[in-house]
Image (cartoon, helix red, strand yellow):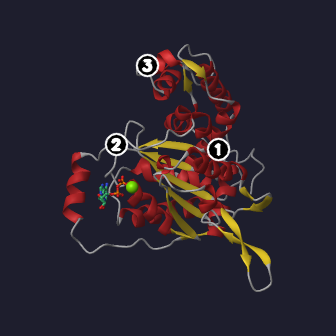
Amino acid sequence: MSDGSAGGARAGSDIDPQLLERVLRLVKAISHEVRKVYVGPDPIIEALLVALLSKGHILLEGVPGIAKTTLVKTFAQVLDVSYRRIQFTPDLLPSDITGTYILDMRDNTFVLRKGPLFANVVLGDEINRAPAKTQSALLEAMQEGQVTIEGTTEELSDPFLVLATQNPVEQEGVYMLPEAQLDRFLIKLIMGYPSFEDELEVMRTHDRPPEKATPILSGGDILELSRLASRVHMDEELFAYIVRLAQYTRNHPQADLGASPRAAIALMKAAKSRALLRGRDYVLPDDIRALAPLVLAHRIILSPEAELNGYTGHDVVSQAIENTRYGRT
Ligand SMILES: Nc1ncnc2c1ncn2[C@@H]1O[C@H](COP(=O)(O)OP(=O)(O)O)[C@@H](O)[C@H]1O
Ligand SMILES: [Mg+2]
């Protein structure tokens, strides 16, 4: 459309404005569908969409009974792609999720019986209830986009999105997700209790006949949207802003390990997706500020003393945002 020199002062991408409007309409429709079932704040639904467009996975953490499962199930319904749910339990084996070779008696050959990971959208419910080995199989699949079954490598679907839930680790009967592997999730979202108004709404609507969300986005739509997101323009200043934020967390005295360059790239991708979801073809500092806690906090490994004192990755990221300037300084 333009070579980047034409257009408004903020322009810098060549995304057709009509496409941007179409994205806005889609976002509105998706949000409407999800809200037929789930009552909650916009940023939560937006976080799911950010992960989807960034080709990243998302982990929802929170106490039981706040509609984590309800939300991810409903979100998956809106996506018109293959979908599987895996309930993680203490006896779940890696092969239960990846699949396994079974002997076909008729001609004495081994055939692959594909596990539930071979779907476009995988809901991993309560992943921290399964042993580390099974969690690792999931995380490896998320990282590689493929699984290895008895020495043979199989490609997973594209798009491949894992929506996982877990209860906070203080609960009984759960296995801590290995901290170093949490960074396979683009976003970790901590869900809290609903607001007074939202909880009232949950009560009011609870006894109505259950509504179902209508599928809206095809696999092709998802891929197209994520290609669009990668074309969103990001200023040099904003690259520098992200790098400063990441470096701040690395130099933070309470952190043994701060945000890596991979984490910084993740934040960049997520920020572009958020911009697109809001109908912009350029990133604003606000996109970065809003997403930094969701993208960076779970990748920060605190020193043992800091952890003992109740410090969290979120504290480190908040301080990074407070103390890092955007723009020329
Ligand atoms: N914000 C909410 N919106 C809609 N329903 C809710 C909400 N919070 C709780 N509920 C209802 O509470 C129940 C528990 O939801 P569930 O998804 O199983 O929670 P979780 O997975 O967090 O344990 C469901 O019946 C759900 O309909
Ligand atoms: Mg649940």
Q: Disc 2 residue type?
A: Gly
Q: Depth check: 249 or 19 in front?
A: 249
Residue 269 tag number: 1
Picture quarter with ligand 2: bottom left
Viewport quadrant of the C terminus: top right
Q: Vertically, is 242 above or below 256?
A: below
Chain-order first, disc 1 or disc 3: 1
On screen, residue 190 versus residue 208, left or right, reads right
Residue 308 tag number: 3
On screen, residue 4 versus residue 180, left or right, reads right
Residue at the top extreme of this rendering: 253
Q: Disc 3 residue type?
A: Leu
On screen, residue 245 versus residue 305, left or right, reads right
Relative image position of residue 162 (x, y in whole percent): 57, 55
Query: Looking at the image, which residue is at 45% across and 63% down?
Result: 73
The residue identified by callout 2 is 192
